[in-house]
Image (cartoon, grey):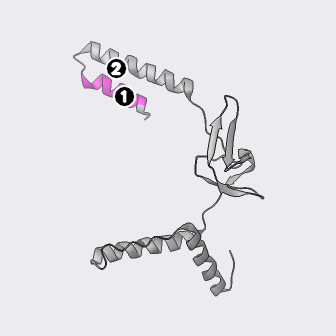
Amino acid sequence: MKAIDELREYASECCPEYEPYDSRMMRIADEIEAEVSANYIELPKDADGVPIRMGDEMENGEYRGKVTDMSWDGHFWHVYHGSIAIAPCDYTHVKPDPLNELLHDACMNATRICCEQGVGTNIRIEVDDTELGKFAERIRELMGGSR
């Protein structure tokens, strides 16, 4: 159910005995819906059809980086990695490395278990993606494999 439909439902159930309030709420709901639909702009999509948002990590054969700026000029989306303008349809979202995710989960679980056991209750194991990537590559080397 859309939020606007919830507002209409609330308005009709809230005060059925007080008709002016009900009709005013319905009118406001109609105005909100008209404003939102008139100003709605669909986000740009990558080559896979996935919407692009600020901070998303994108890549193509040449570049890889986070979306740092986006603007709509009334006709087209302009999407940037720093000062580099990109064509959204030429990029895809970077797929997360499953080994990085496993390492991240292991760190988070270790923190949780320490806190639950009362061992070093202020312990925080924080590892950024770069460090996780290094750990993942080292584990792959030790296993004699690659991605």
Would you name the residue on which mark 2 appears? 25
Q: Residue at x 39, y 16 (%)?
A: 27
Q: Residue at x 69, y 53 (%)?
A: 92
Is residue 51 something one can see in this rendering? no
Identify the amino acid type marked 1. Answer: Leu
Would you name the residue on which mark 1 appears? 7
| Magenta stretch in the rendered image | 4-16
Q: Residue furthest left?
A: 17
77 displayed left or right of 101: right
Quadrant of the snapshot with the N terminus: top left
Rate crowding at label 2 as few (under 14), some (14 to 19) or many (20 or more) other CA atoms within 10 Å.
some
Quadrant of the snapshot with the C terminus: bottom right
| Disc nearer the start of the sequence (2/1) | 1
Rate crowding at label 1 as few (under 14), some (14 to 19) or many (20 or more) other CA atoms within 10 Å.
some
Residue nearest the observer in this picture, 38 or 66: 66
Residue nearest the observer in this picture, 61 or 25: 61
Residue 11, horizontal then vertical, whole percent:
31, 24
Residue 21, horizontal then vertical, whole percent:
28, 17
- Position of residue 138 relative to residue 49, above or below, is below
Q: Which mark is residue 90?
A: none
- Position of residue 49 relative to residue 42, above or below, is below
Is residue 75 something one can see in this rendering? yes
Q: Are circles 2 and 1 on residues that touch, CB within 8 Å?
A: yes
Identify the amino acid type marked 2. Answer: Met
Residue 54, horizontal then vertical, whole percent:
58, 47
- Position of residue 112 relative to residue 84, above or below, is below
Overall secondary structure of the magenta stretch? helix
